[in-house]
């Protein structure tokens, strides 16, 4: 079998969602050569392949990336397909070199350069920007395999709409934002239970008059400027946000109750093929939707920077591996880092650092960087 040729390029961006496109925009602004690799068939598919009724939690005036406002009424909340189409137009407008259908299988060092293997393609680069979110690989509890095979099981990542479910009761396991919204989506056609502890909720309607002010204060002031790794309160909030569920943003407990969604405790196991709650109740359901989160899925990064599945970094820069960067991770720099309003700032900072290293004719070493303060 012939060994595939190696494609050499100065910078490889891994991930073609909003983080990767933001990085691409700033790389192009600096006039640097790069390519964006994305596993999806089309730009925007990470949004298209979500449940049908999904809308963004942020109004359109906050949803545009650098250089291109979101084309919608200022206070509207875009659908997931509108967001996907926007990203596709963004890539086209700025002629970003996105190569779709390329799933990276490993990232290693090959001498002084990075080696990226993706199926039958090989890349070598001086710089790599991993532009991916913390939500890549669906997590489902091990005991799910003990449920009766006649029970339809879906992770929230695979859920599209009630048409996927069998007749009968539905258990949505996981009471965060996704779980709550999916429960409201199915309760019109199924008896629905939402399992998991109350994570709290935003005390105003994000699509109301008060919400217009509240969203600005929460996202543009608190999440973007106050809750950062540079402030004591930001570092404290970061620990809580990474370890606990986030409050409900659009859905309120009273909305769930009014719709007929029954709240229960956590699902802890299976008995006789049925899910069991922490109070030892057995639930007779024909469908289970696991809204139980994701892992970042970075096992393909074969470099000594990983700790508990996450990379050690300083605001997206990796002192241990000069030339390696991250954008898009939850709380990479601020509480807004993984959101559309925050990803552009992180991308700009990372690319400015990368460009400065290139202009010096060398990669910045750990000695040139501030002490490593955080790991995401």
Image (tube, helix red, strand yellow):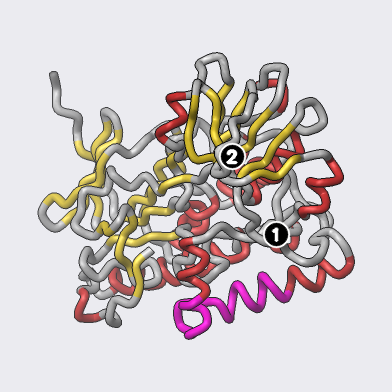
Count residues near mark 2 (Cα–Cα under 10 Å), then give few for <14, some for 14-19, many for 20+: many
Which residue is rendered at x = 46% and y = 77% of the image? 235
Which residue is rendered at x = 29% and y = 44% of the image? 299
The quarter of the image holding the N terminus is: top left
Magenta: main secondary structure equals helix
Is 42 above or below relative to 376?
above
Is 101 above or below relative to 196?
above
Where are the magenta residues, as a range? 217-236
State which mark lies toward you, 1 or 2: 2
Residue 112, visible in the rendered structure: yes
Specify the farthest residue to the left.
111
Name which quarter of the figure residue 46 lies in: top right
**Membership of 137 in magenta stretch:** no
Mark carried by residue 173:
2
Pick whichever, 344 or 192, lies toward us.
Answer: 192
Q: Is residue 242 left or right of residue 263?
A: left
x, y percent for residue 319: 25, 70
Q: On the image, numbered disc 1 is attached to which residue? A: 69
**Membership of 220 in magenta stretch:** yes
x, y percent for residue 368: 24, 81
Mark 1 lies on a secondary structure that is loop
Whole-Å distance between the Cαs marked 1 and 2? 36 Å
Pick whichever, 256 or 30, lies toward us.
Answer: 256
Which residue is rendered at x = 75% and y = 48% of the image? 78
Q: Is residue 262 left or right of residue 209?
A: left
């Amino acid at each position: 079998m012939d060994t595939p040729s190696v494609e050499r390029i100065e910078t490889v961006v891994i991930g073609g969602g909003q983080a990767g496109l933001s990085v691409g925009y700033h790389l192009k602004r600096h006039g640097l050569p790069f390519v964006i690799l994305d596993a999806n068939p089309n730009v925007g598919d990470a949004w298209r392949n979500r449940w049908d009724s999904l809308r963004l939690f942020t109004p359109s005036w906050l949803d545009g990336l650098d250089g291109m406002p979101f084309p919608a009424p200022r206070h509207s909340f875009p659908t997931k397909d509108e967001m996907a189409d926007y990203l596709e137009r963004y890539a086209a407008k700025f002629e970003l070199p996105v190569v779709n259908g390329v799933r990276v299988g490993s990232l290693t060092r090959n001498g002084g350069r990075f080696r990226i293997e993706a199926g039958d393609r090989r890349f070598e680069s001086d710089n790599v920007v991993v532009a991916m979110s913390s939500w890549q690989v669906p997590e489902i509890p091990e005991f799910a395999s003990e449920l009766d095979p006649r029970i339809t099981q879906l992770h929230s990542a695979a859920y599209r709409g009630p048409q996927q479910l069998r007749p009968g009761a539905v258990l949505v396991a996981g009471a965060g934002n996704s779980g709550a919204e999916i429960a409201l989506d199915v309760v019109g056609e199924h008896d629905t239970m939402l399992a998991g502890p109350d994570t709290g909720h935003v005390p105003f309607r994000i699509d109301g008059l008060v919400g217009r002010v509240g969203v600005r204060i929460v996202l543009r002031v608190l999440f973007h400027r106050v809750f950062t790794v540079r402030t004591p309160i930001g570092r404290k909030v970061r620990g809580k946000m990474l370890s606990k569920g986030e409050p409900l943003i659009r859905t309120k407990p009273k909305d769930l109750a009014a719709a007929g969604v029954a709240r229960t405790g956590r699902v802890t196991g299976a008995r006789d093929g049925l899910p069991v709650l922490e109070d030892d109740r057995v639930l007779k359901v024909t469908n289970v939707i696991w809204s139980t989160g994701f892992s970042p899925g970075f096992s393909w990064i074969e470099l000594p920077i990983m700790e508990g599945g996450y990379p050690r970094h300083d605001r997206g820069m990796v002192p241990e591996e000069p030339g390696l960067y991250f954008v898009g991770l939850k709380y990479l720099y601020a509480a807004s880092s993984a959101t559309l309003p925050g990803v552009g700032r992180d991308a700009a900072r990372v690319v400015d650092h990368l460009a400065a290293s290139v202009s010096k004719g060398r990669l910045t070493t750990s000695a040139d960087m501030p002490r490593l303060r955080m790991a995401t």
